[in-house]
Amino acid sequence: MTDQAPAPYTGPQRVLSGVQPTGDLHLGNYLGALVKFARMQHEIETFIFVADLHALTEWVDPKKLKSNVREITAAYLATGLDPKVASIFAQSAVPEHAELAWVFNCVARLGWLDRMTQFKDKAGKHKERSSVGLYTYPVLQAADILIYKATHVPVGEDQRQHLELTRDIAAKFNHDFEAPGFFPLPETMTQGPGARIMSLRDGKVKMSKSDPSDYSRINLTDDADTISQKVRKARTDPEPLPATLDELKARPEAENLVGVYAALSGQTAQAVLDEYAGQGFGVFKPKLADLAVSVMGPIGGEMRRLLGDPAEIDRILGAGAEHARSVAGPILAEVKRIVGYWAG
């Protein structure tokens, strides 16, 4: 007797993603995620949340958490997400996430979590001092995805292992509870160019809000003058831009700025080199600064406008949570039936 392939999932196609409310979103977040959220909402049913449950895995000031949720929501809206098209909500407003996570904690195996490299990186040598939440973070992430039966998830390299864990949990649930095809095995949604933007001060380090130098990044809330100044002060080298991508690889700061220009303009990096090969950064940087201001400046302005009306942001989050629960609730109810919970 041969093993049969598991029954395929035949439900609707959905995509889900979220961002932790840690504040200070920057150009890397925009090009790596936000601009793609805005595009994919018109291609597939889309759920985008603010991951405030995940934010608690490390200490966060309670006084700032709510305002950070609003800031992330403002960024979603300012970069093109339409609450009439995509479901935009705070993770904590949909309790089905946490309830499904408990079921998945009982499905996932310790050995699977022990292999998660992101926990090892964050915990370092002080594993015993880390929260249990940080350790089980990937299980909650699996619940985030599967409570909507999301079939596609846009992830960066640092999250690919977590998506594989989600697939393992879905497959084991389907098998252990004799529910073939109940949960989908989510697929990675290709991020495309611009997913990895490096620091403006060091082309070998990813752009990050944790960098002590504000000149290492362009924040979404920066005004036009600040954006222009940061681009003009970005670290470079004395050589003119080369003609080929192979020549560019050995020059991380130059490669990063060319990549930023390409992502902001919608061109390939080679097309940028075709235009600027042989020219120095005295020519290229002002052009890049003008481009960055034209794209990023309006986003910062719109975010500031939205943050001036927190009641409207809260209204959008409330409506998004209501719709998310209308999808998540029936799925959780079916999970409860499958696992044998008492129903009264």
Image (cartoon, rainbow, N blue to C red):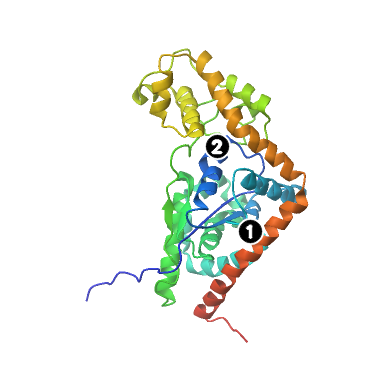
User: In this rendering, would 6 be left or right of 326?
Assistant: left
Q: How many marks?
A: 2
- Along the line of sight, which residue is nearer the eye, 62 or 121? 62
In the foreground, 257 or 284: 284
Q: Which residue is painted at 72% across and 57% down in the image?
A: 315
Towards the viewer: 66 or 59: 66
Q: Residue furthest left?
A: 1
Check disc 2 and give the amino acid type: Gly
| Percent position of residue 44, x then y | 48, 57
- Place residue 305 in its image quadrant: top right
- Is residue 250 toward the left or the right of residue 203 in the image? left
Q: Residue at x 70, y 60 (%)?
A: 318
Q: What element does badge 1 sit on?
A: helix
Residue at figure coordinates x 73%, y 55% from the top left:
314
Mark 1 burial class by Cα count in 10 Å: few <14, some 14-19, many 20+: many
Which quadrant of the view contains residue 35? top right
Q: State the quadrant of the N terminus.
A: bottom left
Residue 34 visible in the current orientation? yes
Task: Tell me the number on the disc at residue 303.
Answer: none
Q: Which mark is residue 91?
A: 1
Residue at the far bottom: name it.
344
Give the residue type at disc 1.
Gln
Residue 124 appears in the rendering: no
Per the image, the residue denoted by label 2 is: 28
Q: Secondary structure at mark 2?
A: helix
Q: CA distance from mark 2 to mark 1?
A: 23 Å
